[in-house]
Amino acid sequence: MAPTTHTVTNQPPPLVGYDVFAADAALTEGVARHVPPALREEARQELGELGRAAGSAHAQRWGALADGNPPVLRTHDRYGHRVDEVEFHPAWHRLLGHAVSSGLTDAWSRPAGHVRRTAGFLVWTQAEAGHGCPLSMTHAAVPALRADPALAAEWEPLLTSRVYEPGLRPVADKPGALAGMAITEKQGGSDVQATTTVAEPLSSDGEYVLTGHKWFCSAPMSDAFLVLARTPGDASRRADGDGGGLSCFLLPRVLPDGSRNSFRIQRLKDKLGNRANASAEVEFDGTTWARRVGEEGRGVATIIEMVAATRLDCVTGSAAVMRQAVAQALHHTTYREAFGKPLAEQPLMRNVLADLALESEAATALALRLAAAYDADTDQERHFLRLAVPAAKFWVTKRCTPVATEALECLGGNGYVEESGMPRLLRESPLNSVWEGSGNIQALDVLRALRREPAALHAFLTEIGTARGADHRLDGAIKGLLTELADLEGIEARARRLAERLALVLQGSLLVRYAPPEVADAFCAARLGTDHGTSFGTLPHTLALRAIVERARPVAER
């Protein structure tokens, strides 16, 4: 009888069949903290349902299939007619349909809607991140469209609908719709003032035809897009030296009479990650019809509300990638043994895992705090968001890639193969630091808020000041931040340093107030104090590392 050579031993079981929401203590506690008591049970039930779906075998399969079968562009039909359609794998539609039906495009019409949606977005993104793009843009289009009450009345019920119906038809015939955004151009990137797309007015008030191109247009099969273009009046303002005004437009894919709008998809981007989602280059040929949103020449001010909301989703999406990476690392090291005991019980690995868990919890706490500020919708909270959002977007999105890399390393060679799912997380990890303005744009936006809106700094300092006196390292970091703010010499060259310090101090204040003492102590020691290294796994060995790891460990139902 031939000897057995392929008995499988010491291989962890897959992390499947668990509640992604309930298994995340930082997330469940944050939701309970920010959702009013009367709504907590309702929120817990809906997020639990979504969490169990996200941790299920079928959702994980959908994510792998959607990522492994990228969308395909069809510019013409078999007869040569221009169609400009993108075909997605059925798994994409299943993911997107489940997300829409779970309310991930509807934060604006229900109490505590932003906290509940942010928590849901963080949970469901862990199944697959690419389809989060149309979810985010659809959600974020609502405040921009409110600049035009008539447009908002027409489109908001569709964008916040819980019915997903793919395919291009007049939106009047659809129970729900998705929205996208096409702003950047090949010559300008984040410098929207370099926009060359032009809009010529038609005889009907508010209607225009567009000529131009957009270098990045995500989810091009959405029902409508917000775009920026120059009107003849904008050109006059530019000549007068008022900053070069732009106007905002809503561009539908299908016109009210059922005919296709001219929306020429030139090609799809071949991207590092986010491969399940289509990102396109599009052109408008002079017959592309659009309606102006808001006042002429006030396009940037109109669309900035959409940009701010999508930046919060960048923070949340990065927190989701970090959480899933850390969950996989914790799960693997719990079951994988080396040198006579589980990897997670080895002192050095425990240090790494605890350090990763700290980063994940701090990102989650910050995302939920920003969402709660949206729900409160007071002047104080709006001022707080003006500074906190770009700082958080700068820092949290940048921490995502090192977390994903270190978590992958916890799995060793197993983490380097596609079947583990870790390479997909790693490829996804840089996206949110680029989307909606890369690091320099966020850091400069922090400076802009400091210079133009003194109330933003006051609101931010009030927020972090509530934790003063609770930890000497946090107090020292706040003092250092105030010193940094008082010295304006070379401030632009120090903008990244300042954005980083703002985010870290804000995270520290949140954890000191709300996290267990062992988590807050470790964060303050490693992120705000001086007793730390420059890589993960360099926490002081005297900290309660085991407790931090146990708190973060996902527990699958058996």
Image (cartoon, grey):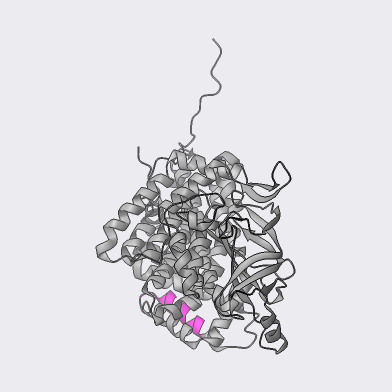
Q: Is residue 167 left or right of residue 546?
A: right
Q: Any magenta on residue 479?
A: yes
- Nearest the viewer among 450 and 115 is 115
Q: Position of residue 172 (x, y in %)?
A: 49, 58
- Nearest the viewer among 19 and 4 is 19
Location of the N terminus (image quadrant) = top right
Q: Residue furthest left?
A: 38
Q: Is residue 318 above or below residue 205?
A: above
Q: Is residue 512 left or right of residue 453?
A: left
Q: Position of residue 120 (x, y in %)?
A: 41, 56
Q: Is residue 160 above or below residue 328?
A: below
- The residue lying at 69 percent from left, 58 percent from top is 281
Q: Main secondary structure of the magenta part?
A: helix
- The residue lying at 51 percent from left, 57 percent from top is 171
Q: Position of residue 147 (x, y in %)?
A: 50, 76
- The residue lying at 48 percent from left, 61 percent from top is 316
Location of the C terminus (image quadrant) = top left
Q: Which span is picked out in magenta?
A: 468-482
Does the rendering let one see residue 529?
no
Q: Residue furthest top?
A: 1
Q: Is residue 76 left or right of residue 308?
A: right
- Nearest the viewer among 347 and 322 is 322
Q: Any magenta on residue 284?
A: no
Q: Is residue 41 left or right of residue 320?
A: left
Residue 117, located in which quarter of the rendered image?
bottom left
Q: Position of residue 331 (x, y in %)?
A: 45, 44
